[in-house]
Amino acid sequence: MPRQLISLTINGREREVAVEPHWTLLETVREALDLTGSKEGCGTGDCGACTMSVDGRIVTSCLMLAPQVNGRQVTTIEGLQSNGSLDPVQQAFIDTGGLQCGYCIPGMIVAARNLIDDNPSPTLDQIREGLAGNLCRCTGYTKIYEAVELAAERIRGGA
Amino acid sequence: MRTFEYKAPETIDEAVSLLKEAGGSARPLAGGTDLVVQMKERATRFPYPATIVSLDRVSELRGVDFSETDGLRIGAGATMTDVATHPAVRERYAALAEGAGVVGSLQTMNMATIGGNVCNAAPSADTVPPLLVYDAKAVIVGPNGRRTLPIAEFFRGPGETALESDELLAELRLPVPATGTGAAYQRNTPRKQMDIAVVGVAVALTLSGDAIEHARVALGAVAPTPLRAMSAEAALQGQPASEETFAKAAEAAAQDSTPITDIRASADYRRHLVKVMTARLLAEAANRAKGTA
């Protein structure tokens, strides 16, 4: 199949990329745009390791086809930092030790940032619900939820 | 994933022409949370598509609109998030908000569309029992124009619908529920989220004082298609809204179901769930009906 040119805004930068129609957004971002923060876990939309934000809504990028994001705004884990400083959510995961192997964390943090943007003071149940689409097989989630609570608190305080 | 030709029409008519030209070798793509998974796993119920007709640029398929005269119109391309968070859906069609609100994760709900949930035709589809109790109609567009089908006649079997290969589900139309109507949807799953219904039950009751004027009971995951529990509805019609009536109707609903035993549950357990859940939901719907009257 011939490649087709799509243009998208990725982490605030406009890019053009030649894709094959069956490439997923995840493959395109990792292989063609060299942004390898987002991970493929299951490839079937269950684990959330590939979570990205498209036009402000989080999606599992392993199930989105590259041509579907033509003209859209995509944010990945690499897009959260600003001017070399980590996002407060990233910093909170470091400070609480909210990770072990780390494979799920890029998707987890993108989903957590989205959750806090929608609800600056999430309860523990709301955090659990908001992150239900992001599986972690190491931590048992306790430290992850602590990280999200800490991040929310810091963001409310103006971090 | 094996490759395919990709088309992104901007109108329904253009999409239908592309499907017709392809003569059965094309599939429409909505949110992709079912179709892309099936294609990756080579588990489609149809030959692997040579052409994908993506519907994401078709603005006519979007939107959720409510009016007191025409009721609810849901574009087939409305996402689960669009449906579950829409103020009129939450207020007037609570069972549908509940069904759309439990489909997968937030990520899934942001991608999956109500049209996709209906057209994938899983017996467990969470939006379908609610659509059945609200007497939804499916508006279908094909090369020869539009046709309308009651949602109950849309399903033919697991993954099988009334759609021809060159037809699209364009929208769902739901009449305005009568004053004094209460409705609810619940499903049973071992996990709270990210699971598939073992049994899904939706009910709608319209009360006049304490008498049941109008009743609907619909079941998911207990037959080859989602279905209306007709003898349960008959057991409710005209009766007092009492625990005794609800118990009889719940028993009838269990008799109306024809579940199978599979990895999620045995047929007997599913029948038991239908009974327990139907009784509980009827009580809940009656409470909600009293709250609106």
Image: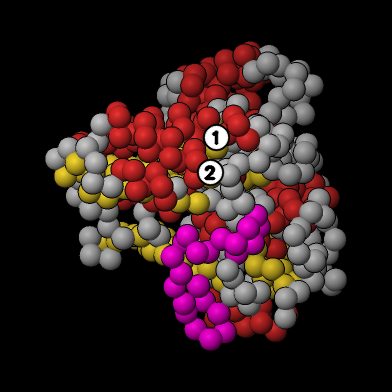
Residue A44 location, quadrant = top right
What residue is shown at x 60% (from left), y 79% (from top)?
B16
**Camera sees residue B195:** no
Task: Name the residue tied to disc 1.
Answer: B271
Tell me the crowding category of disc 1: few under 14, some 14 to 19, or many 20 or more residues within 10 angstroms, Cα based: many
Asked if the stretch drawn in magenta spans residue B38, the answer is no
- In the picture, the quarter occupied by the N terminus of chain A is bottom right
Residue A155: where, in percent of width, then height? 48, 25
**Camera sees residue B273:** yes
Three-letter amino acid code at the position of disc 1? Arg
What residue is shown at x 64% (from left), y 62% (from top)?
B160
Magenta stretch? B140-161
Residue A16: where, in percent of width, then height? 72, 62
> Which mark, residue B257?
2
Residue B57: where, in percent of width, then height? 57, 68
What residue is shown at x 62% (from left), y 83% (from top)?
B17
The reply to whether the C-beta atoms of the residues labelled 2 and 1 are less than 8 Å apart is yes
Tell which subunit mark 1 falls on. Answer: B
Decide which of tag 2 and tag 1 comes sooner along the chain.
2
Badge 2 marks a residue whose secondary structure is loop
